[in-house]
Image: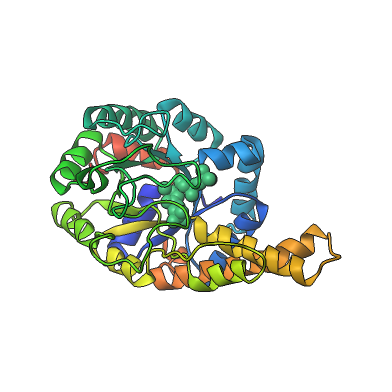
Amino acid sequence: MALITLRQLLDHAGENGYGMPAFNITNLETMQAVMEAADRTNSPVLLQASRTARKYMGDRFLQGMFMAAVQTYPHLPVCMHLDHGNELGTCMEAMDLGFTSVMMDGSLEADAKTPSDYDYNVAETSSVVEVAHARGISVEGELGVLGSLETGTGEKEDGHGFEGMLERNRLLTDPDEAYDFVAATKVDALAVACGTSHGAYKFSRRPNGDILAMDVIEKINEKLPDTHLVMHGASTVPQYLQDLINENGGDIPQTFGVPLEEVQRGIKSGVRKVNIDTDIRMALSGSMREFLLKNRSSFDIRAILKPGRQRVVELCIERNELFGCAGMADRIKPLSLSQMADRYAAGILRPRAA
Ligand code: G3H
Ligand code: 13P
Ligand code: ZN
């Protein structure tokens, strides 16, 4: 079995200057599509499941699907990552299920709505790191609160995001604080706030530096050149998918995502993990709408889901190629969790701010 940790995967990405798309998995079809795209491009795989996705699928079904993915494609290194863990208990459940990486999102309190303070974030994240590293499992932390620089609010379209309004400085990760946070918590990867948010409604216009602060990422990278940075809310929300939905009975107001060139610019400045969920949802649901409108008498759910699964394959292939991870799978020899635990214990995998 070719399970791999986030730390080993992102170390390889860092050494070779590429980015890893982290695809959110919601059901069988999204999982199959991501794996087929990886197989066709010889890419390592970074699968992530949110708490909501875990609840929707059920932990045992999710675990079975992960294992099936690894067994079907034994030649591909696969990282299983928990997206937006909210407290130690949630992260430990995921570790017990076989996840090789967890995110402890301490930028918000355990209710995932209230912005936390720095000390809370350090304490919660450090407690997860201590448990995880002893088991060889990687940890992603988050500093700065994800939200819109246009409105000062958090996006709650997908149930994530803070309530109320925040000042611009809380919505941007401070590079000095980032340095201290990585040194104090020993996280393997750091999610940063730079104006992106979850869901389709990220920007009301094509973003410039005022509302998508790529310069913040560049400054953090100058301070922490060896730290693997993570971009959340990195879907591009492409026009062709907005059109596909709207031309087939949907009603999505015009919106803008993160342009692919900006993601590629981030990859040049230390972004190693690029989170993508919304684009997958749009590709799958838009294709279902199209099929159902064209085939009004059909109720064959396999036929309804198939074109969307294919569109997700194409989208993931494009991301794998543009982020540079295509062709990398067979260049990685995954280390086991116990080998990783030994490396942490021996101090070989030092915090990236040391
Ligand atoms: O973190 C945000 C992802 O898009 C997951 O969203 O909780 O609706 O699965 P979700
Ligand atoms: P998108 O909503 O932009 O796809 O972001 C997903 C994400 O950040 C998951 O953690
Ligand atoms: Zn996220």
- In the image, 348 versus 39, the foreground residue is 39
Q: Where is 274 relative to 96, above or below?
A: below
- In the image, 110 versus 123, the foreground residue is 110
Q: Where is 230 relative to 162, above or below?
A: below
If the image is split into quadrants, where does the C terminus sit? top left
58 lies left or right of 14: right
Name the residue at 20% across, 34% down: 184
- Can the viewer see residue 334? no
Residue 130 image position (x, y, % from top left): 32, 29
In this figure, what is the number of numbered marks?
Answer: 0
The colour style of the image is: rainbow
Residue 201 image position (x, y, % from top left): 44, 57
Name the residue at 50% across, 55% down: 277
- Can the viewer see residue 297? yes
- In the image, 301 versus 327, the foreground residue is 301
Q: Quadrant of residue 111?
A: top left
Q: Residue furthest right?
A: 297
Q: Where is 70 relative to 179, above or below?
A: below
Residue 204 image position (x, y, % from top left): 38, 62
Residue 64 image position (x, y, % from top left): 65, 43
